[in-house]
Amino acid sequence: MKAEKLPIVRFAPRGADSFYEAVTEKVSAYFEKNQLSPYANTTMWIKTYFMLLLYVVPYVLMVTGQAAGNYWLYFALWFLMGWGMVGIGTAVMHDANHGTYSPNKKVNSLIGHILEIVGGYSATWKIQHNLLHHTYTNIEGLDDDISSIKLLRFSPRQPWYWFHRYQYLFAWFFYTNMTLFWMTAKDYLQIIRYKKHDLLANQKVSFGQAIFRITMYKLFYYGYILVLPILFSGMPWYLVLAGFLLMHFTAGLFLSCVFQPSHIMETSAFAAPVKSEGKMHMEDSWAIHELGNTTNFAPKSRVLSWFIGGLNFQIEHHLFTGICHVHYPKIAPIVKSTALAFGLPYHEQETFMKALLLHAKMLKLLGKE
């Protein structure tokens, strides 16, 4: 398979006394003044154990037959596992694979592999999320997060088809299938594409190794998540399958509702690179590009922020991926005041529901010819 490397897109230099230089200095001063580490604290570790238990305890109860014959309890356990998947994905795995648990890379790597336990593959996730999404947010052809199926249009720079008129209605169905698709086919499709674009070297893995590891991880996942419950839960196979789907539909819908309003919004710039002297350039610096394509929501909701790993502070996350999310609520006012002082946008919605409604509005706008 001949490699077709992705085009190199360069952002404008940030320049002296830039926004990013100023905000980085102020955030660093905050940690120094308060004698804090930017890595995980005790609160983060407690949350980690809670999220793992939210997934593991219902599974153990279900697979050992504790809910046999009690349909309400049985499906409630699968439902809780769905929320456990959300918690692991947003508040545990995400931070670990960004390297924010500890300055020790081995600690982050170990915790990051929790993704394999819930059916994913860390190497492809890091390429899609850390390398492509965080570098080229909302840039068509480079940000994998907006490269979806043909039925969904997430950028005004993507081809339009007549059925996109109704995507604001049916997109939610596909959102429910997000994790199910991920845990079955997505990793394989990504590894083929990343091999084509010569991106696997970034994760120090060959194509053959990646295919082998994905297959082993999937066999392990489907073995414990479907085979063991069929054998030992005391429930018929079709109810096991129904519970499994309930878990994934719960996790897929909520995770999509967290991710999508962060970038697929009417306020997002969706800027495209311009070609000059044979090279692709962005008019803005990287940090300003991130501000223009990212939205925070529900900044005052402590419960939501706690559960979704601070991803409602998406601006802070994109600018400071090396800082653990438990610190976002404190550094957010610093980032906001600095952005406004530089005359830059700081997109923020007061509530989660308002952000979702505006995302739905954006889907409708993108559905227009």
Image: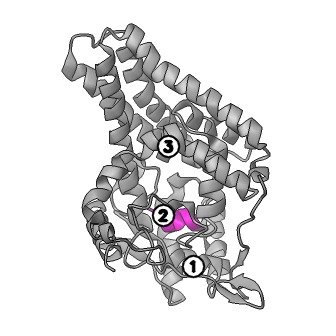
Q: Nearest to the eye among marks 1 and 2: give it.
A: 1
Q: Residue at x 26, y 25 (%)?
A: 75
Q: CA distance from mark 3 to mark 1?
A: 28 Å
* Residue at mark 2: 314
Main SS of the magenta segment?
helix
Mark 3, secondary structure of its residue: helix
Is residue 99 in view? no
Residue 78 can be seen in this image: yes
Nearer the camera: disc 2 or disc 3:
3
Label 1 to label 2: alpha-carbon separation? 13 Å
Q: How many marks?
A: 3
Residue at numbered disc 1: 289
Q: Position of residue 356 (x, y in %)?
A: 30, 63
Which span is picked out in magenta?
A: 313-318
Image vertical order of residue 359 relative to residue 324, above or below: below
Picture disc at residue 182: 3
- Taking the image as shown, residue 255 lies to the left or right of residue 31, namely left
Name the N-terminal-most of marks 2 and 3.
3
Scheme of image coloration: one colour
Q: Which mark is residue 344?
A: none
Image spot of residue 109 (x, y percent): 69, 40
**Which quarter of the figure has residue 244?**
top left
Q: Residue at x 61, y 49 (%)?
A: 190
Residue 11's place in the image compared with 171, above or below, is below
Residue type for callout 2: Gln
- Give the SS element for disc 2: helix
